[in-house]
Amino acid sequence: YVHKVKTGTLSDKEIKRIGFPWSPALVERSRRSVGGTISACRAARTDNIAVNLAGGTHHAFRDHGAGFCVFNDVAVAALTMQIEDDIRRIAILDCDVHQGDGTASILTDCPDIFTFSIHGAHNFPFHKQRSDLDIALDDGTSDEVYLAALRKGISRALELAQADLVIYLAGADPYEGDRLGRLAVSKEGLTERDRFVFAVCQTMRIPVAVVMAGGYARQIEDIVDIHLQTRTAASFT
């Protein structure tokens, strides 16, 4: 699959499943996204927290892409950190509104990488994979219910994972104005989400690598605002 992406020999069906037309620029962007997440993981080890302004392509599987995701940067980065950087236990906290199905599939036989996903129950992907801990939310879930489920789920995930590193997918798509999200979380709710994740990791002394993941708001300025809020919250951690 990787060879076909690099050489432009994907079938029409494979390209349609990814959702983007193939181009050399797509290949370069996809590869750099993976490299950026690996770099963020390494920077987090020394700086406590680091942000890749890309990444979170969690619908890519081992042998195919899907849902606008070509390579699964999070899974590759987690495995790379284990193999090359002597990080043993990793927790992936996926707060994109869509389940991290590719991540769960790739890492299903990796007991030292804990996968957590909080997502819309009735949203894409319609055939879910099994993460180590999944929280599925009803359409229209608003701040209070979302944040209560998030706090409980992440606290439980980190308790079970006993992680040496966290990779956090800070998706902008739970936002109430997102075209594809189907939840009703405000910008303030998403800021509180970020602050909680960073605070609990800081308390537990776990370095955090942040990736941006999805965002499909009707107004692109809203996506920028939400991602900027994440970066700002990280800078004050």
Image (spheres, helix red, strand yellow):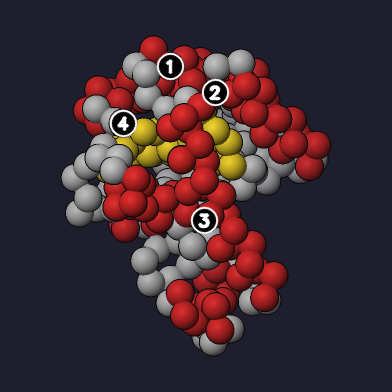
Vertical side of 97 occupied by 83: above or below: below
Foreground residue among 181 and 199: 199
Q: Which mark is residue 34?
A: 3
* Residue 154 figure quarter: top left
Between the residue at mark 3 and the residue at mark 1, the CA separation in whole angstroms equals: 25 Å
Question: The residue tagged with tag 4: helix, strand or loop?
Answer: loop
In the rendered structure, the answer to whether residue 36 lies left or right of residue 146 reads right
- Residue 123, can we see it? no
Between the residue at mark 2 and the residue at mark 4, the CA separation in whole angstroms equals: 19 Å
Q: Which residue is mark 1?
A: 202
Foreground residue among 168 and 122: 168
Between the residue at mark 1 and the residue at mark 4, the CA separation in whole angstroms equals: 12 Å
Q: Which residue is mark 2?
A: 194
Question: The residue tagged with tag 1: helix, strand or loop?
Answer: helix
Who comes first in sequence, dot 4 or dot 3?
Answer: 3
Check whether the beta carbons of the residues at disc 2 and disc 4 lie within 8 A of each other.
no
Quarter of the figure with the N terminus: bottom left
Question: The residue tagged with tag 3: helix, strand or loop?
Answer: helix
Who comes first in sequence, dot 2 or dot 4?
Answer: 4
Who comes first in sequence, dot 1 or dot 2?
Answer: 2
Q: Position of residue 93 (x, y in %)?
A: 40, 35
In the rendered structure, the answer to whether residue 72 lies left or right of residue 29 reads left
Q: Amino acid at mark 4?
A: Asp
Q: Which residue is mark 4?
A: 164
